[in-house]
Image (spheres, rainbow, N blue to C red):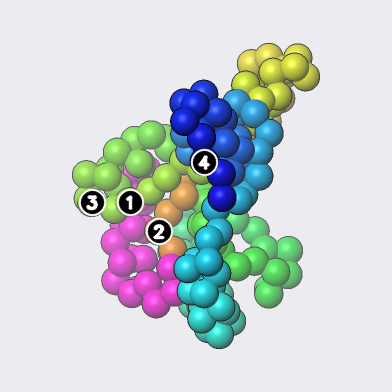
Amino acid sequence: MITTNRDDLNEHIRRLRNHGAVKPFVHTEIGMNSRLDEIQAALLRLKLRTIDKDIGGRRAVAAEYVKRFAGTPVKPPVALKPDAHSYNLFTVRLPKRDAVRDALTAAQIGTSFCYPQGLHLQDVYRHLGYKQGGLPVCEQASGEVLSLPVYPGMPLVHVDRVAEVIRSTLG
């Protein structure tokens, strides 16, 4: 536990415990993931009892998404081995990403941009000297990625709805 009455030190410590982020996925310094407390540890111990089932549920949802996006411009994540991906996120690459996200939001379907900017353009790595255009494939990908809902036990009707909104938006 750390206590302080200094606002600057408080902000610095809060950034450090969350990967150096000032807001989700925007980093100003190198940090770590230090957000686990005793209560979370106790809950994690319980959750570990069902981890295989939960990962299986996520994999099943991911497989359904993959089926629904076959033959579309949506590029799902690729698992190099069938049992190698836990699908904590189901991040796809797709054209018209912003229009798709707007349509999903209008349909009250949550999404996120988990990788909105390449690490080479974040303040924390500014000292490396990269500029916009320095890693064009990374920059293109960061403009195309969108994370879709995925959780164990997600009903197929929800997967269908997400896929339908995306397909109709892409035309």
Mark 3 — residue?
108
Residues at discs 3 and 4 in contact (Cβ within 8 Å): no
As measured in the structure, the alpha-carbon distance from the residue carrying label 1 to the one carrying label 4 is: 36 Å
Comes first in the chain, label 1 or label 4: 4
Residues at discs 3 and 2 in contact (Cβ within 8 Å): no
Q: Give the camera-side residue of 26 and 113.
A: 26
Comes first in the chain, label 3 or label 2: 3
Q: Position of residue 117 (x, y in %)?
A: 57, 30
Mark 1 — residue?
110
Q: Check disc 1 and report its element: helix, strand or loop.
A: loop
Residue 76 appears in the rendering: no
Answer left or right for 65 relative to 109.
right
Q: Residues within 10 Å of mark 1 (few under 14, many from 20)?
A: few
Residue 109 appears in the rendering: yes
Q: Residues within 10 Å of mark 4 (few under 14, many from 20)?
A: few
What's the mark number on residue 3? 4
Residues at discs 3 and 1 in contact (Cβ within 8 Å): yes
Mark 2 — residue?
149
Q: Quadrant of the C terminus?
A: top left
Residues at discs 2 and 1 in contact (Cβ within 8 Å): yes
Residues at discs 4 and 2 in contact (Cβ within 8 Å): no
Q: Residues within 10 Å of mark 3 (few under 14, many from 20)?
A: few
Comes first in the chain, label 4 or label 2: 4
